[in-house]
């Protein structure tokens, strides 16, 4: 397939390309030329000092992860309102749907996952499809349905018995079995924490309890394999840092939250999480974690890890994915002990697998241009529709639009009912 087929066709393609390019150039100019947006009246020496500080940036270095020097903590894509940002992607999907004769083709990208993993699927259904001899790569997990006809106390007692049989001990990560963007995900360190969590969890729905892996290294590995290909490939590797601020030795924790463009947007949430420590002044260079979650919604920081993709890592992920029945497109969210071990295809645990709705995490890298972000997203959806069309031709029937919207509505309603994430 030639390069022109990965973009939007005809006049809309040229128009969107022009708009995206102009917007990308304008935003890059604004964010790179900090002197031009310095406070009016600031003297030249101070402006030059700020410019030098901006060019030097701040180094982010978590244990086990490759260090990264950053000039800003939020990407151009992350600054755009979601509705505006995804509009070109939607238009691209409409073009792909017209070309392949089916808007919901992604729903059969992974035929053995409900809706292909695009909406409303069980998180546990992915992990259960990884064969037993490969379960050592998966964080031990348990799925439990809170019975609507049982009391909270009886549900808690039954769950604790299941945890004991499964050999799971506190601390644990509690998360909804159906959900997205980290809604309802919390660390439960004690049985008391679990009781409080279950009191706020909707009865009749399923919760997952997973062993807490305290490695700081975290990555999203997007995997793609066409149905007629014997081997798959890693389409994207993105490193994910939990929401944090870095001390400067002068500012209080509250001030750091309010001034970082990434955390400022969720300042109320982060301030609540660290309320007893807001007046403390973190030492220069100290990283203060603000949340368990590593999602964009919670203010996580992502950066590109393509340089760390190796044949050994690709072979390991491909082995796991090919052993899952008819799994062709998805992202393995992993925690790892060290980036060196990850490069060898070792020392990691799979926390979640996401299907057709998964994004390449590296698009949120602060150094990524808006033009490159759209190129990756367009290419990703092109592959997704091609896989769906191929599976349809193999006899798998895509979900109907009404059923898809019903799954979307159910998932959205559940997100509003889950306990607050942490």
Image (cartoon, rainbow, N blue to C red):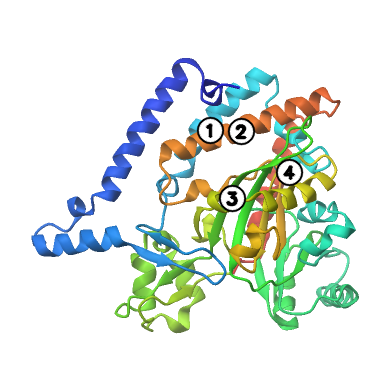
Q: For the residue carrying disc 2, how many other residues have a C-alpha within 10 Å: few (<14), some (14-19), or many (20+)?
A: many
Q: What's the CA distance linking mark 3 and mark 4?
A: 19 Å
- Report the quarter where the C terminus lies: bottom right
Q: Earlier in the sequence, mark 3 or mark 4?
A: 4
Q: For the residue carrying disc 4, how many other residues have a C-alpha within 10 Å: few (<14), some (14-19), or many (20+)?
A: many
Number of dots carrying numbers: 4
In this image, 246 relative to 211: left or right? left
| Relative vertical location of residue 210 with respect to residue 286 in this rendering, above or below | above
Q: Are marks 3 and 1 in contact (CB under 8 Å)?
A: no
Q: Which residue is mark 3?
A: 237
Q: Earlier in the sequence, mark 1 or mark 2?
A: 1
| Relative vertical location of residue 54 with respect to residue 100 in this rendering, above or below | below
Q: Are marks 3 and 4 in contact (CB under 8 Å)?
A: no
Q: Residue at x 18, y 50 (%)?
A: 36
Q: Earlier in the sequence, mark 4 or mark 2?
A: 4
Q: Which residue is mark 1?
A: 89
Q: Are marks 4 and 1 in contact (CB under 8 Å)?
A: no
Image coordinates of residue 57 in percent, x first then y, are 33, 62
Image coordinates of residue 277 in percent, x first then y, are 44, 83
């Amino acid at each position: 397939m030639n390069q022109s087929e990965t973009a939007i066709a005809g006049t809309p393609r040229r128009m969107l390309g022009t708009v995206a390019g102009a917007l990308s150039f304008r935003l890059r100019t604004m964010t790179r030329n900090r002197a031009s947006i310095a406070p009016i009246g600031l003297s030249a020496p101070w402006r030059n000092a700020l410019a030098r500080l901006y060019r030097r940036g701040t180094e982010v270095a978590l244990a086990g992860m490759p260090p990264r020097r950053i000039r800003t903590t939020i990407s151009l894509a992350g600054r755009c309102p979601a509705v505006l940002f995804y509009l070109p992607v939607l238009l691209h999907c409409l073009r792909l749907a017209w070309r392949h004769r089916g808007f919901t083709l992604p729903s059969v990208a992974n035929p053995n996952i409900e809706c292909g993993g695009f909406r409303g699927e069980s998180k546990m259904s992915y992990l259960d499809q990884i064969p037993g001899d490969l379960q050592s790569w998966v964080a031990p997990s348990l799925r439990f349905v809170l019975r609507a006809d049982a009391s909270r106390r009886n549900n808690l007692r039954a769950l604790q018995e299941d945890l004991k049989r499964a050999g799971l001990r506190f601390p644990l990560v509690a998360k909804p079995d159906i959900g997205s963007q980290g809604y309802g995900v919390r660390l439960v360190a004690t049985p008391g924490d679990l009781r409080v969590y279950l009191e706020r969890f909707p009865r009749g729905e399923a919760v997952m309890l997973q062993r807490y892996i305290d490695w700081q290294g975290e990555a999203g590995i997007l995997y793609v394999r066409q149905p007629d290909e014997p081997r798959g490939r890693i389409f994207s590797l993105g490193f994910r840092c939990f929401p944090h601020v870095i001390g400067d030795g002068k500012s209080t924790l509250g001030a750091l939250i309010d001034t970082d463009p990434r955390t400022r947007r969720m300042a109320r949430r982060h301030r609540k999480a660290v309320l007893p420590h807001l007046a403390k002044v973190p030492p220069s260079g100290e990283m203060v974690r603000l949340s368990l979650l590593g999602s964009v919604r919670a203010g996580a920081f992502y950066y590109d890890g393509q340089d760390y993709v190796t044949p050994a890592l690709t072979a390991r992920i491909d082995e796991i994915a090919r052993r899952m029945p008819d799994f062709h497109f998805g992202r393995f969210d992993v925690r790892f002990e060290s980036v060196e071990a990850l490069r060898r295809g070792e020392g990691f645990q799979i926390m979640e697998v996401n299907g057709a709705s998964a994004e390449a995490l590296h698009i949120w890298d602060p150094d990524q241009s808006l033009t490159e972000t759209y190129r990756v997203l367009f290419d990703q959806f092109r592959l997704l529709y091609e896989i769906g069309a191929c599976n349809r031709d193999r006899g798998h029937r895509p979900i109907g639009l009404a059923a898809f919207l019903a799954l979307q509505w159910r998932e959205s309603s559940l997100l509003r009912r889950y306990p607050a994430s942490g």
